[in-house]
Image: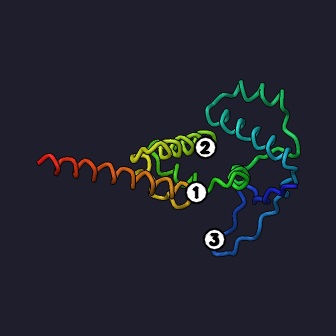
């Protein structure tokens, strides 16, 4: 079973100068792995449609897949379930920054694909590649390949002289 973290309710505040009392938040439901996948996919779709202003599509989606007590309602829970903290930090540096989770995931996967194919620009644009683990190695490999190609060109030019 997957337990989603309990998140404080939005809008809870305290008076200035006083310690913030923990918000009384209803705990998120426990989800099986299959339920977590289903609920997370639905939450991603709902978030995308909401942020893109697709109210009619969202209404139809809600009719066909009604919200339940297990529905994921918090972006913080979605971030935690998908371990997207580092991806969101990287995407925040992009211009324009992707607004939805789906756009962030797409930007991340496309960047990793460019790095894997040896695109040194994609690796150079990434100031925080170490946060991803394997992508740090991919970025270093792409940089090394680019440097080798540059040195070969210089060596060939020197031989011709």
Please report the residue visible at 58 percent of the width from the left and 44 percent of the height from the top.
104
Image spot of residue 38 (x, y percent): 81, 40
Looking at the image, residue 74 lies above or below residue 55: below
Mark pair 2, 1: CA separation: 11 Å
Say which of marks 2 and 3 sits in front. 2
Secondary structure category for the residue under label 2:
helix
Mark pair 3, 1: CA separation: 31 Å
Residue 105 numbered mark, or none: 2
From the image, tell me which residue sits under label 3.
Answer: 16
Image spot of residue 9 (x, y percent): 76, 56
Q: Earlier in the sequence, mark 2 or mark 1?
A: 1
Secondary structure category for the residue under label 3:
loop
| Nearer to us in this view, 24 or 30 | 30
Task: Please give left or right for residue 54 compared with residue 125 in the image.
Answer: right
Image spot of residue 132 (x, y percent): 57, 57
From the image, tell me which residue sits under label 1.
Answer: 86
Mark 2 touching mark 3, by CB under 8 A? no
């Amino acid at each position: 079973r997957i337990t989603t973290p309990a998140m404080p309710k939005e809008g809870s505040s305290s008076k200035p100068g006083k310690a913030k009392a923990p918000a009384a938040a209803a705990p998120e439901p426990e989800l099986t792995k299959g339920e977590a996948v289903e609920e997370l996919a639905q939450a991603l779709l709902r978030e995308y449609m909401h942020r893109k202003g697709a109210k009619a599509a969202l209404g139809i989606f809600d009719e066909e897949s009604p919200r339940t007590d297990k529905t994921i309602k918090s972006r913080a829970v979605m971030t935690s379930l998908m371990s997207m903290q580092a991806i969101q930090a990287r995407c925040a540096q992009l211009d324009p920054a992707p607004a939805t989770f789906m756009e962030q995931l797409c930007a991340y996967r496309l960047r990793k694909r460019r790095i894997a194919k040896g695109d040194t620009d994609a690796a150079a644009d990434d100031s925080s590649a170490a946060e991803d683990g394997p992508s740090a190695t991919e970025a270093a490999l792409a940089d090394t390949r680019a440097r080798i190609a540059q040195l070969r060109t210089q060596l060939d030019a020197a031989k011709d002289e």
